Amino acid sequence: MTEVATTPSAPHPGKEVVYCDICTFPVEYCEFGASLPRCQKWLEASHPDLYTRLYSTGELAEKLQRVALATGGAKTATAVAEVEGDSDTKKLAKAIGKEEAKLKRALDKKESTKVVIKRIERTKKKRLTSIANLEVFDIDLKKAAKMFAGRFACGSSLSKNNQNQDEIVIQGDVSEEVKALILKTWPAVPEANIQLVEDKKKKKDEAPA
């Protein structure tokens, strides 16, 4: 939600300050952050008049636009800055390059991560289902655990696995149902990235004769 407030520290007392939903800075300061391209998209959609005033007029605005529209990652952004020959633009290009690299790393992690749904056998009658790595796909684990509890009418909670990572543990064998619900609820999780695992209780060795 856009926050509008009156701040006494503003250059003009009583002036309304619009804060960016992306970086949370006053929109006039978005250009100094690393998320400028996303800030600009948000501002253009939410406050087109303000966007036009800040980014569609003036030589500096044109430079910022060209840097923000660079799509080749850090190298392209740096190249644009070198052409411009402006130290401020170079700094901004570097910040944008870092932001793009960060987003790429997050995307690569999502593509390589498996959501592991494990069917766990405790006794002959007791089964559990654990789900790991959902948070990599920007899923709130607490909300997901609550949804699973309501959907399957059983206990569902967060716990730590052997790797000290958060996972959701559901009382009962609902692994197939969990997979179907994940695909329906969170389309961002590819089916190929969901792995079903069986964890059976090891039988005790028979005593020697």
Image (cartoon, helix red, strand yellow):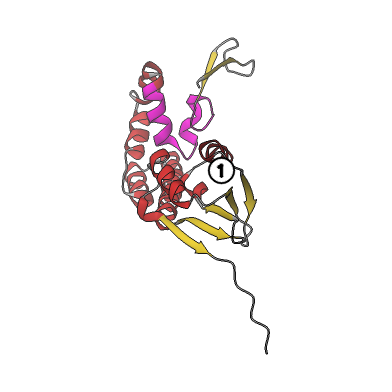
Q: Could you tell me which residue is drawn at 59 percent across and 67 percent down?
A: 201
Amino acid type assigned to the residue bearing label 1 in the image:
Leu
Looking at the picture, how far across and down is residue 5, in whole percent? 58, 15
Q: Could you tell me which residue is drawn at 32 percent across and 38 percent down?
A: 69
**18 or 166, which lies in front?**
166
State whether residue 61 is above or below residue 35.
above
Looking at the picture, how far across and down is residue 108, in whole percent? 40, 54
User: What residue did someone put label 1 on?
Assistant: 141
Looking at the picture, how far across and down is residue 179, in whole percent? 43, 49
Q: Which residues are magenta?
A: 21-45
Name the magenta segment's main secondary structure. Answer: helix
The quadrant of the picture occupied by the C terminus is bottom right
State whether residue 62 is above or below residue 200.
above
**114 or 173, which lies in front?**
173
**39 or 198, which lies in front?**
198
The residue most toward the top is 14
The residue most toward the front is 209
Q: Quadrant of residue 93?
A: top left
20 drawn magenta: no
